[in-house]
């Protein structure tokens, strides 16, 4: 019971710090003004044919593009102030230590699609085995040989988790050990991402979307990555492979 309470507390805290934000000053809305913040090097993912076939995929990719620009901008500001990003290719400490990663329904759909449709070869075989045998106390099931197998469609929580200064030591969760080195949420951009995502749920009226985000209702949709039944995805991938 204690572990469950602590888990729920951390998930709620992450949602509160990272996602529970006001949209009263959000400039995205239906006008779709160009977002000039963030790095000019940030590029939107493109799956042209798949986006035509799956309208929900465009919503997800648009949402991630907004968040990625916000993250790039925040990192750029830090680095201009002489504070360097500790995260580097091959670093996967957070993939081992974090056991309470929040997932929203559209993100979950995107992960399942990407795993089933885009991952091929040896990585696919390894991933199927990891998903089939996954248990809640394991590291992220999508981590393969120190790399994220779904990196392109990794969740917003992962996209935003960046550490500055010293690289994480083995087993360290800097969210607790040195919160000041963990990048603050890119609130305005997450606002915009949620605003886009809510169309997936059939919520088209702007005032309704704003209300859902402002009153926190959107967080009732959250699932926890380690609590998902990933063996179902493994079965789906296996059926696709045997056709």
Image (tube, rainbow, N blue to C red):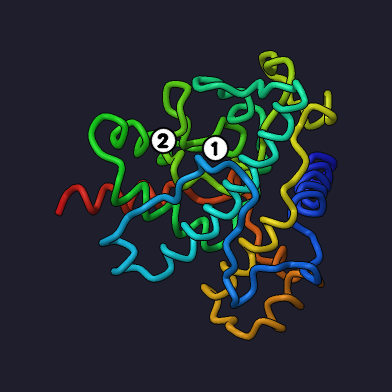
**Residue 241 in picture, x, y percent from top left:** 20, 47
Quarter of the figure with the N terminus: top right
Q: Secondary structure at mark 1?
A: loop
Crowding around mark 2 (Cα neighbors within 10 Å: few <14, some 14 to 19, many 20+) is some
**Residue 66 in picture, x, y percent from top left:** 58, 55
Q: Mark 2 — residue?
A: 149
Residue positioned 71% across, 83% down in the render: 207
First in sequence: mark 2 vs mark 1: 1
Residue positioned 24% across, 53% down in the render: 239
Taking 104 as reference, is 77 above or below it? above
**Residue 77 in picture, x, y percent from top left:** 72, 35
Apparent side of residue 157 relative to residue 55 in the rendered image (left or right):
right
Between 240 and 133, the one lying in front of the other is 240
State the mark number for residue 135.
1
Distance, label 2 to label 1, CA atoms, is 18 Å
Q: Secondary structure at mark 2?
A: loop
Residue positioned 67% across, 37% down in the render: 161
């Amino acid at each position: 019971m204690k572990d469950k309470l602590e888990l729920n507390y951390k998930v709620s805290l992450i949602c509160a710090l990272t996602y529970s934000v006001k949209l009263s000053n959000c400039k995205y809305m239906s006008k779709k003004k160009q977002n000039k913040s963030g790095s000019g090097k940030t590029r939107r993912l493109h799956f042209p044919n798949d986006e035509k076939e799956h309208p929900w995929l465009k919503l997800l990719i648009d949402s991630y593009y907004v968040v990625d620009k916000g993250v790039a901008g925040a990192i750029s500001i830090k680095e201009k102030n002489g504070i360097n990003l500790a995260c580097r290719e091959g670093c996967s400490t957070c993939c081992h230590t974090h056991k309470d990663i929040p997932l929203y329904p559209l993100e979950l759909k995107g992960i399942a699609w990407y795993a089933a449709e885009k991952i091929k070869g040896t990585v696919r075989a390894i991933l199927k085995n990891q998903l089939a045998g996954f248990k809640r106390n394991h590291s992220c099931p999508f981590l393969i040989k120190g790399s994220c197998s779904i990196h392109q469609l990794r969740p917003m929580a992962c996209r935003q988790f960046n550490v500055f200064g010293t690289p994480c030591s083995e087993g360290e969760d800097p969210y607790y050990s040195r919160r000041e080195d963990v990048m603050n949420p890119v609130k305005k951009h997450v606002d915009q991402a949620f605003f886009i995502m809510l169309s997936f749920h059939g919520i088209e009226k702007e005032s309704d979307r704003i209300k859902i985000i402002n009153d926190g209702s959107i967080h009732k949709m959250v699932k926890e990555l380690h609590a998902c039944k990933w063996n179902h995805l493994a079965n789906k991938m296996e059926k696709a492979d045997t056709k």
